[in-house]
Image (cartoon, grey):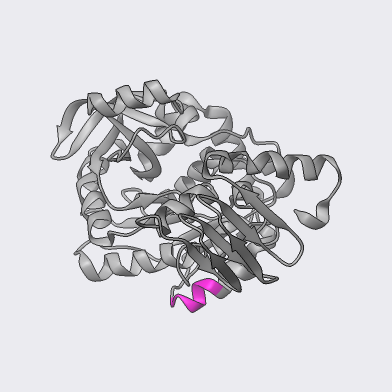
Amino acid sequence: MAKIFPVIMAGGSGTRLWPLSRKQKPKQFQPIVTDETMFMQTMNRLESGRQLTNMEIADPIVVCAEMHKDMVLQQSHEAGQNLLHLVLEPVGRNTAPVAAITSLIVNDIDPEGVILLLPADHHITDTDGFWSAVSSGLTAAELGHITTFGIQPSHAETGYGYIKIASPVSDKVFAIDSFREKPDQVTAESYLEAGTYFWNAGIFLFQAAGMLTEFEKSALDILESCTICLNKSRRRENSIPLDHDSFSSCRSDSIDYAIMENTAKGAIVAPVDIGWNDIGAWSAVQKVLTENNSTVTRGEVMTIDSEACYIRSDGPVVAAIGLNNVVIVATNDAVLVTTPEKAQDVKNIVAELSANGRKDLL
């Protein structure tokens, strides 16, 4: 059985969870759903894998922005996790360069090693089910497939991309027919009814050497840029601050566009039903935490005659009266009030603040 090398992608900005998520401390380093940060939850999930399975799981490689180095080290220490490497990005370049850089690193350590590529900001309630899905995907990855995970849709969601399955590859693993962008409501309902479409979780499992081959075929420019960058980067013990100029010149792209939509070796573990949520907006937080029209509060919050609300204050006292299905998030310097239906548009507020030069609120 191949050794698994977890790679945690912790470089996102989380703009749709403003005003809590900021550049200096984005959502993955915040306690959003539980009292632990999502980054620490991801780290703890790795430790559970060592206890629940017979798979050999290496210490994780974490990829994050340079400015978040100290936070990563502190929260890794609090989670009791050692890092195999800490890769520091001078600028964000999406997930494809992350896959290329870490494949080069792991290939030097173990050419047969399998990378488990994980976003740092996902919520998963069924840890046993998660590792069962990884076990199913590992067989396909060892056979050379670039494997992803398809979440069982619980409703006609328009905020996620979908993957349509094709013929079986192995037990619980299928070839990929196609990737579908975020659909409108009617299309999402047709996907749900068809039963052959699954939410794209953005989690990947693949051999490092196999991924490098796919980059050579489909995104050679990214691989060449990352190779040059890694050769120019000066390693400091287990820390790898990426060379600024060469990494900045790398094309920004996602794994889905650069590799998955072009490879003949794509595969998907499906259905995966593990209580997954990417916590992409405050509506997702509300959905995870509220049940039976209950109102969930955090911090100094008072409510009267309010139903199905999520109200959080990390600053002043917030009092809510007679509200229904509303999201309120307050910090010391900003207050967000929205509905779940409009929660995705918070990123537009962030864009307007940026355009107006309000760096103090970003």
Q: Furthest-right residue in view?
A: 357
Q: Position of residue 181 (x, y in %)?
A: 45, 26
Give the camera-side residue of 91 and 351: 351
Q: Position of residue 44 (x, y in %)?
A: 38, 69
Q: Position of residue 14 (x, y in %)?
A: 60, 50
Side (left or right) of 304 relative to 256: right
Side (left or right) of 330 relative to 124: right
Quadrant (top left, top right, bottom left, bottom right) of the N terminus: bottom left
Q: Furthest-left residue in view?
A: 171
Tag count: 0
Q: Main secondary structure of the magenta part?
A: helix
Q: Quadrant of residue 210?
A: top left
Q: Is residue 82 visible?
A: yes
Is residue 76 in the magenta section? yes
Q: Position of residue 224 (x, y in %)?
A: 58, 34
Q: Is residue 26 visible?
A: no
Residue located at (67% from left, 62% from top): 330
**Vertical order, 134 against 81 (above or below):** above
The magenta span reads: 75-80
Residue located at (20% from left, 37% from top): 173
Side (left or right) of 150 relative to 232: left
Is residue 151 in the magenta section? no
Residue located at (25% from left, 40% from top): 269
Side (left or right) of 319 relative to 39: right
Give the camera-side residue of 303 and 97: 303
**Vertical order, 60 against 362 (above or below):** below
Give the camera-side residue of 242 and 134: 134
